[in-house]
Amino acid sequence: MSGIPSFTVETSTTTSQVTMVFCIIFALLMFSMPLWAESSLMHWCVEVICFLVLAMMWNLMAGYGGLVSVGQQAFVGLGGYGLFILAQHLDVNPFASVLISGVVCAALAIPMAKVFFRLKGGYFAIGTWVGSEIAKISISNIPFLGAGSGQSLTVMVKIPHDTRENITYWIACMLLFASFIALYALLRSRFGLGLTAIRDSEAAAESQGVPVDRLKLQVFVLSAFGSGLVGALYYLSILRISPSAGFDLAWVVAATFIVVIGGIGTLEGPIVGCAVFFLLRYFLADYGVWYWLIMGIVAITVMIAFPKGIWGFVQQKWGWRIFSLQRKLVLK
Amino acid sequence: MLKTHQLKAFYGDFQALFGIDFEIGQSETVAIIGSNGAGKSTFLKSICGLIKSPNETVRLENHSIGELPAEARVRLGISLVPEGRKLFRSLSVEENLRIGGFAKRDGYWNLARVYELFPALIEKKYAPATSLSGGQQQMVAIGRALLSNPKLLLCDEISLGLSPLVVKDIYNALPKICAEGLSVVLVEQDIDAALKASNRYYCFMHGKVSLSGESSFAKRRDISAAYFGITEDQS
Amino acid sequence: MMEWLDMVIQGILLGGLYALFAIGLSITYGVMRLVNIAHGDFIVLAGYATLPLVAYLHWHPFVALPLVMLIMAMLGYVLQTTLLNKTIGPDILPPLLVTFGLSIVIQNGLQQLFSADAQALQIGDLQIASLQIGEDLAIGWFPLLVFMVALAMTFGVNYLFNHTDTGMSLRATSDDPITASLMGIRAQHVYGVALALSFALVAVGGVFSAIRTTFTPSTGPISLLYAFESVVIGGLGSIWGTFAGAVILGVAQALGSKFDSGYGILAGHMMFLLILIFKPDGLFPRTRA
């Protein structure tokens, strides 16, 4: 009768421990920016953070939950308008409104999911898009929200310029780190294991007792929460919203491309994708349409030749991992 | 007419066949028997092209065909009656039969002759194929394969899930099928039916040929050993 | 009263155009579970493809139509066999993401080639000519023509699927591509045929749409939404169901715009939403045996 060899389960590696240190340094750097950085740099950071978090939310849905949505912009718009309704019209503290707006989006996501989950695969993707259009057209017809031309967050005039900018910036930083920590923790938990099972085989996962429908709902709601926060934050920082901007398809196009090019289903992917996205934007700024054309061609090529994206390819080839989500069985 | 040489097959990392040497001549009926998971279906799929192999390992009339896809092998005259019938549910009975002829090979078999072989199908011509009983569906599946006028007919467990009476009916049709010079490979779990209907047999176990010989001289005890892997000491 | 009847008729005729959009989408989903997110952009592409034929060869759009249909059908076949066949498989992400990418490429490519200016195809007097029925009712000749063509093409597609060998191949491959290969049918080729057929319909819809209203590189996506809504309202699996769904959508939009000119599209969306909530399988679903 042979015995079981003794073993441990490893979840972190040297790389990931180095990363931890690096992250802490990075966090200190980011949070201290208002002390030494220029206004325009902070503004740019807020924008990058918005795109990155939005991409992470899209990645959570598509890469981990298997739900491709072309309607994520609905929550960006609803989050933005939520902020305006709360801060501009209901006199709630604008900074607190960001969080409340996110929660409202999460709440709205529940009935939306119930309806749109009746559609599967590609039809679900387009269905969520229709949902976004409904939200957009409805808001365009509400006069006190500025109807089609939108409105400005004039209530912010009461707050001194520097304070407003700094707090907006710190909210962005908090959103970034909170998102990462939350996702990382979630994906390492049973929730994350369940998602990976669904991703590999929905039928097999179901037969093993994984509550597929419930997990998908949770992923959808979480993603809506994050996207709503992004919307509220973005429009807090630029102080003006309109239906065509808040519900612009470009939001989900950007999120999709960032995730696909960077590496779908990985935590590092959106970071890589975001870097590519903004680099391309910088170099092709003067070439208008070429920017999107090239993004599109790159996305198609990546999907066909490197379906796991840049980071997925790197991970497969060289086993690099910054945020270790894997468990290694180490035999003694 | 068809030979395989050291044929191997893999499903991903899992090896299902470990080097099968097999041959069948013109107008021969060969049975392949073995328990579940022995590799019989995998073998048939390798011959008809659903699973590809190194070119040389499968040879039809001295042509290497291992790398050809199924669509090409049908045109060369290899036809499979798949396990579980696999009729097209969007097609009627007659459409299922006619689609068998899309490979456009000339020969004895046409729609009228298939109806002669299986008269029970005539009144069900326009019914959706999946509304038929198991036995009738099997007739459609066989008729469909015949309509491609094959040289080699591969039958994968045609008695599976059917009552003994129905199985008898179907096996009674076999002589008529073989009368036209067709070579037939019969994969079966029902040993008696398979041996009675065939000239020679192979027994598969764990992806290898464990026994082969003339069907009329097959000894029960040898078959059990080769089928189940039970040796004298263990039985 | 007559005003409402007039609106309903207009909606029905508009539904014909939407049917041309929708049936193509229905075919590719039915045969290979492919949802082409660039579907609407190909509709607008057909309009743009007709522009040079009209501008430089001075062809009437109706004369250019068959050629555009042929070009689009060939484009569909090539696109499927070279690019999209690589994405077909158990994972739903690749085809969605690749066609999404295509959508962006087409929109921006068109903008690069033709600028973002609004374009239109002219057919002269036929555009506004109308057929007088009784005293108070007038039906536009052009919308009626579009509806008739849509009806005819739907009959044609149905006939193709149910009474031809090609249709049998399409149905069999959609049921079971592996067993279809045992019949000598190459799934890759069949998928190409399916997209070619879809694109032929898209071409007709695109040219008619380009005549009906002005178009820009970014007007594609809304056509995709109309096609999709028609399919969902009508129910999956049935070509005539999709046609009915398209007509219902058209009527909903027409009645909505009667209420208030800004509400037409929203009324259509709400109709779609209502069906999705109360009759998620659609109004005329074809259940598979």
Image (cartoon, rainbow, N blue to C red):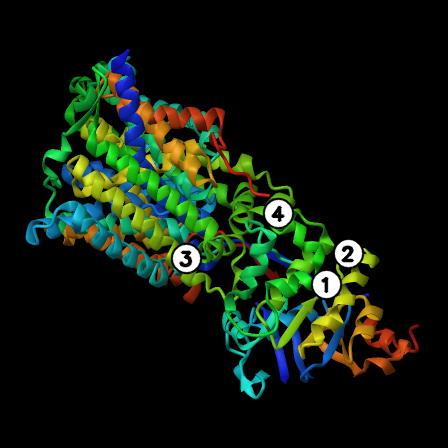
Q: Reply above or below: B100 against C94.
A: below
Q: Reply above or below: A309 against A29.
A: below
Of the numbered discs in the image, which one, if any, rests on residue B158? 1
Q: Nearer the viewer, mark 3 or mark 4?
A: 4
Of the numbered discs in the image, which one, if any, rests on residue C191? 3
Q: Amino acid at mark 3?
A: Tyr
Chain for mark 3?
A: C
Chain for mark 4?
A: B
Chain for mark 1?
A: B
Comes first in the chain, label 1 or label 4:
4
Nearest the viewer among A86 and C65 is: C65
Q: Which residue is mark 2?
A: B162
Q: Work out whether disc 2 and disc 4 sit on a shared chain.
A: yes
Chain for mark 2?
A: B
C-alpha separation, residue under disc 1 versus residue under disc 4: 22 Å
Q: Position of residue A209 (x, y in %)?
A: 64, 42
Q: Position of residue C46 (x, y in %)?
A: 22, 48
